[in-house]
Image (cartoon, grey):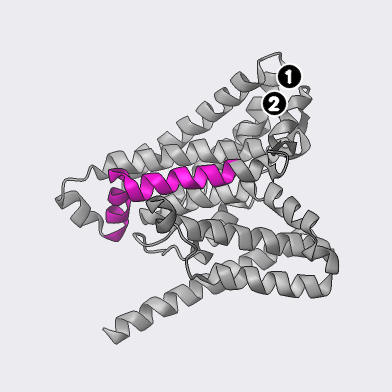
Amino acid sequence: MSVLKKIRLPQTTALYGIVFTIIVFSIWNHSFFAIGNFVNVSRQLAPLAIIAICSFLALMTHHTDLSVGGFMGLAGIVACLLSNKGWNLFAACAVALLCTMFLGMINGIIIAYTTIAPFIVTLAMMGIAQSIASVLGRESLKFANEKFAVLNNADVFGVIPLPFFITVALYLFIAFILYKRKFGTQLYAIGGREESALASGINVKRDKIIVFTINGLLGGFAGLMFSSRICAANPTFGEGYELQGICSAVLGGTALSGGKGSIGGAFLGALAIQLIRNGMNFVGLNSNIQMITIGVILVIIITMDTFRKEGKRNEK
């Protein structure tokens, strides 16, 4: 119960975005407000919401992780290739996640033990992951085992979409770690002031490696969730998700300077972005226009966040 109190809905820009989006698109197209559409949104939310966790954890340590989009495409390709060669579906997915975890760990090690900017490290790793995926599968691959689609199509208790159930459970687990375990306190300390965290005895290097290893795992899992939607894999499936994840986390109130933010806010940010994308699909906007819109939203949020911080400094 105490964990649930900690992750109560925060008063963030994401809430206004959700309300505004529902009102505008419901007026534009009455079908948008249908229960069936909201069920569809909850089913499609999982990949973005999981990537939002990755962005949140990286931002909490005052870093950015641009590699998670590449991990999405790689995980789907690896799982599909192994499954189509006769591997057990669970084993194929496990190997895919181990691959992205390993690459995430490499990110963490480089960031922890060098002075190379994290966005450069993770941007390079995104390119590496996408290149490996392209070499393994030059075009879309179809899962021969159609049971893989159950990950997206199944319902819990016949009512709750399985992807949404998994996402909520994952957020509750992350919240438990953040608010009830020492590791969560350490992440907030690292993001707040790394020098102070070091002085207090926190193993900053180790915690950074753990964060980026987790991001590797979650990025791969988000890719599997996305691939299960159409029971296929493609190296480009995760393109743009790294920026949408950052947008979701910042929209949910996570500070770009690190050390401040709510995992519940990241979820709301992802929900707001997914509703906007769903609404744009309803009115027939193509994917390029949608990406431009998400980019504009991200620029506006970052600008507002910068002005807000400068205003607080001036008040002091």
Residue visible at 63% across and 39% down?
223
Q: Which corner quadrant holds the C terminus?
A: bottom left
Q: Is residue 168 left or right of residue 273?
A: left
Name the residue that disc number 1 marks.
Answer: 84
Q: Which residue is drawn at 37% across and 57% down?
A: 62
**Which residue is labeled 2 in the image?**
80
Span shown in magenta: 166-192
Looking at the picture, which amino acid does disc 1 mark? Answer: Asn
Task: Mark yes or no: residue 113 visible.
Answer: no
Could you say which quadrant of the image residue 192 lies in?
bottom left
The secondary structure that most of the magenta stretch takes on is helix
Q: x and y percent of residue 127 in the render?
A: 57, 42
Q: How crowded is mark 1: few (under 14 residues within 10 Å), some or many (20 or more)?
A: some
Q: Residue 270 carries which label?
A: none
Left or right: 29, with 24 as reference point = right
Q: Do the residues labelled 1 and 2 touch (CB within 8 Å)?
A: yes
**Element under disc 1:** helix
Out of 238 and 60, give the one closest to the viewer.
60
